[in-house]
Amino acid sequence: MNVVSRDRGLTFPFPEPPAPGAMVEVAPGVMWARIALPFRLDHVNIFFIEDGDGWAVLDTGINNEATRAAWESLVAGLGGRPLTRLIVTHFHPDHIGLAGWLAERFDLPLLTSQTAYLGCWNISLSPGALDAEPYRLFYERNGLDEQTTKIVSTQGHGYLRMVAPLPPTFTRVVAGDRMQIGGREFRVFSGDGHAPEQIMLYCAEERLFLAADQVLAKISPNVSVWAVDPEGDPLGLFLRSLRNMEANVPNDVLVLPGHQLPFYGLHQRADELIAHHDERCAMIHAACAKGAKTAAELVPVIFHRALDPHQMSFAFSEVLAHVNYMVREGDLAWVREDNGVHRVTVN
C-alpha cells in the first residue's frame, strides 16, 4: 500500500522517488523511473507505459555516458520486453537529449511536436550563435553590464550541447490528437511558456495526466524571454496554458510531472502558480512606481540571494518575461533612453 502525504492541499501518493535504476508502478502498466542530472535540479522523471508486448517511453535525460548506462540498466529490468516508441515532451536537453541515441540503440520511432524537433536541432547545432552581436545587445540594453553579458550569453552552451543528433525523421504530435498506447487512449495537450508546444498526455478513463514541466509540485517551471525572441510573452502564454488546462483536465487526475513527485491536486497547483506570478508582477509594479527600472535592476526585487552566472541568466530572463507580460497588459510602459538602455515605468 502506498503511503500518502499531504501538503498545501496537494496529495502525494508516492512520497519517495524510485531508487537509481529502479521503477515504481504509479498505475497499472505505468512505471516511473528517474534519471540523474548534473544540475541543481538533479533529476528528470521518465515514464514507461505498457504498449502491447512492450513499453512506450516518455522523455530521455541528457546525452552523457552516465545517462546511457542508466538506460541500459532500466531496459535490462524490463524482463526482455522491448521498447516500442519514444515520446518526447519538449526540446530542453534534459528531456530530449538522449532521444537520438535511444532511437538508434533500440530501433524506436520518435514522436514529438514539430517545435520540439526543430527547436532541438536549432539550439544543439550552433549554441555559440547566441554570442552574436544582436543577442549581446539584447542583454546590454536591458541593463546588464558588459562583463555579465559575456558570461550570461555564453555560459549555457555546454548544456545546449548535451543532445545526441536526432533521428532524420520523426512523427509529429499535435494538440487535439488522440494517441493509442496499449489499451489506453490519451488526448494530446500542448502547453507553452516553459517550452513552446510542450506535449502533455491525458487519459480520461484512468484519470492520468502526464504533465511534463508545465505543472510541478513544489517549484515553478522556468518561464523566460530569450534573446532570439526579445519581445516574446512566454508568461502570458504560460498563464493561458494553465487556465486552458484547468478548463479541460479535471482536478482529480494523478499528475505525472517531468520533475519532483507525482501528485493529486492539479487545479490547486495551477492556481498556486498563477498566484505566484501575480505576486511577482505586483513586486515589479511597486518597484517601478518608485522610478523607471531596467530588467537587470529588477532582478534583486524578485531574487533576494546572490546569483552565480548560470542562475543570473535564468533570473534575468524570468524577470523580463514578467516585464514583457506587464507591458502587453498595459501595466508598464517602455522608456527607451538615448544611450540605448531600455527601462520600464508604471503606465
Image (tube, helix red, strand yellow):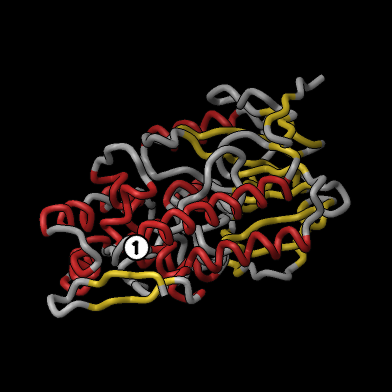
The answer to whether one can see residue 84 in this image is no
Where does residue 36 sit, x and y in percent of width and height?
A: 46, 32
Where does residue 339 sit, x and y in percent of width and height?
A: 12, 76
Image quarter of the C terminus: bottom left
The structure residue drawn at horizontal position 80% and vertical position 53%, both measured from the top left corner, is 203
Q: Pick the residue in front: 286 or 32.
A: 286
The structure residue drawn at horizontal position 79% and vertical position 46%, both measured from the top left corner, is 253
| Relative to 309, 314 lies left or right | right
| Residue 6 image-quadrant placement | top right
Q: Pick the residue in front: 272 or 139.
A: 272
| Relative to 223, 267 lies left or right | right
Where does residue 140 sit, x and y in percent of width and height?
A: 18, 65
The structure residue drawn at horizontal position 28% and vertical position 69%, both measured from the top left corner, is 343
Q: Which residue is mark 1?
A: 123
Where does residue 320 sit, x and y in percent of width and height?
A: 37, 63
Image quarter of the N terminus: top right
Q: 333 above or below 70? A: below
| Relative to 140, 65 lies left or right | right
Q: 338 above or below 301? A: below
Q: Pick the residue in front: 205 or 283.
A: 283
Tally the numbered discs. 1
The structure residue drawn at horizontal position 39% and vertical position 48%, both measured from the top left corner, is 302
| Relative to 139, 205 lies left or right | right
What SS does tag 1 mark?
A: helix
Q: 232 above or below 102? A: below
Residue lying farthest to the right in this orientation:
205
Q: Amino acid at mark 1?
A: Ile
